[in-house]
Amino acid sequence: MQKKKRKCKGPTQKERVQELLDILEDGVLNFLPDPEKFKAILEMKALMPNYSLRNIIIAKGQLPHARFLAGYKRWNELGRYVRKGEEAIRILAPRIKKVKNEETGEEENKKIGYIPVAVFDYSQTEGEPLPIDKIKIELEGDSPEARAIISIAEQIAEQDDCPIYYGDTGTANGFYRPFFHDITVSDKLSVNHRCKTLVHELVHSKVDRFGSIERSSKEKEVVAEGSAFIVCSYFGLDTSDYSFEYVKGWGNEDNPVMRYAERIFETSSSIIKEFEDLMVAKTEADEECVA
């Protein structure tokens, strides 16, 4: 006896993902940044030393969520202190030597190489609040949808041998470490925000595991947050209040979502399939137990 094929009601998975991708693009394009937050970012950048792109890459290789870097002395000048037990980030500084100019006879500084110097990220410090503290955005609430997504995301990570830790993440909401292939999510976040952050870092663990140098930090973050928005929304958790601003902040161009749309679509679709496969497996297991 042949089983009757059930008619598919509503949009397919691909159609739903494309619909959510369109919502993300429209939300980011039409997002209006808070002038006070923009001002706070500029104030923060003015306080921080300027480092070369090479040093920023070196720093992020040691601490992926590093954003604002300064030396121990500079943090003290700003009223902040490096927390006990924090490991310094090593970057390169020019090694200067005084040499005599043969033409003028005067001494002048000459770069003769580089030496490693220690710096720390804002997330490794504590003390006086700085402008960055004014712009932290958060998702509030505790929903059954978020708890269900967290449970499945944890199973996916476990199958991929990617440990998940909940604890102190400094000023970051969470981070993924490619070298260790593990995820850490702040235990201070609400359940809804913890869910969104976990999915964001899960995306990183899927697509950035081997630290591809071909992809910029901007692409990695736009893809991770865009995919997290689609996956969470697909399963009932709206993260637009956070995601639109986050993606807009990373996209200097007018349309960052369109630029990485194909990668966001493929990544979110793949993760949604993993979610649904686990959900089907759980349903079948539950039915067998009842039988």
Image: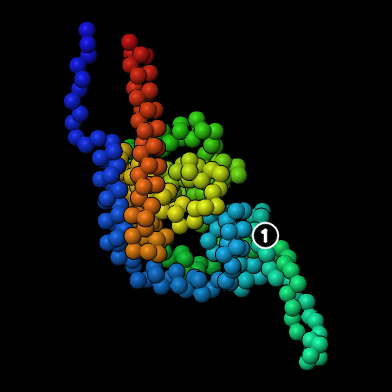
Quadrant in which residue 108 is drawn: bottom right
Q: Is residue 118 left or right of residue 153?
A: right
Identify the image quadrant of residue 77.
Answer: bottom right
Q: Residue at x 34, y 25 (%)?
A: 280
Residue located 61% across and 63% down the image: 55
- Is residue 205 visible in the rendered image? The answer is yes
Q: Residue furthest front?
A: 103
The residue closer to the viewer here, 141 or 290, is 290
With respect to residue 128, does 274 lie above or below? above
Residue 124 placement, left or right of 133: right
Q: Position of residue 221 (x, y in %)?
A: 45, 53
Extreme residue toward the top, this view: 1
Per the image, the residue denoted by label 1 is 90
Check disc 1 and give the amino acid type.
Arg
In the image, taking residue 271 as reference, residue 119 lies left or right, namely right
With respect to residue 290, does 208 lie above or below? below
Residue at left 68%, top 68%? 93
Label 1 crowding class (10 Å Cα cut-off): few <14, some 14-19, many 20+?
A: some
Viewer-proximal residue, 155 or 56?
A: 56
Q: How many marks?
A: 1
Residue occupying the point 37% across, 64% down: 253
Nearest the camera: 7 or 101?
A: 101
Residue 171, image x, y percentages? 51, 57
- Quadrant where the N terminus sits is top left
Q: In the rendering, at what x and y percent does residue 59 appear? A: 60, 58
Which quarter shows the C terminus? Answer: top left
Q: Can residue 125 be seen here?
A: no
In the rendered view, how is the structure colored?
A: rainbow
- Position in image of residue 262 (x %, y %): 36, 47
Residue at the bottom extreme of this rendering: 104
User: Which SS class for mark 1?
Assistant: strand
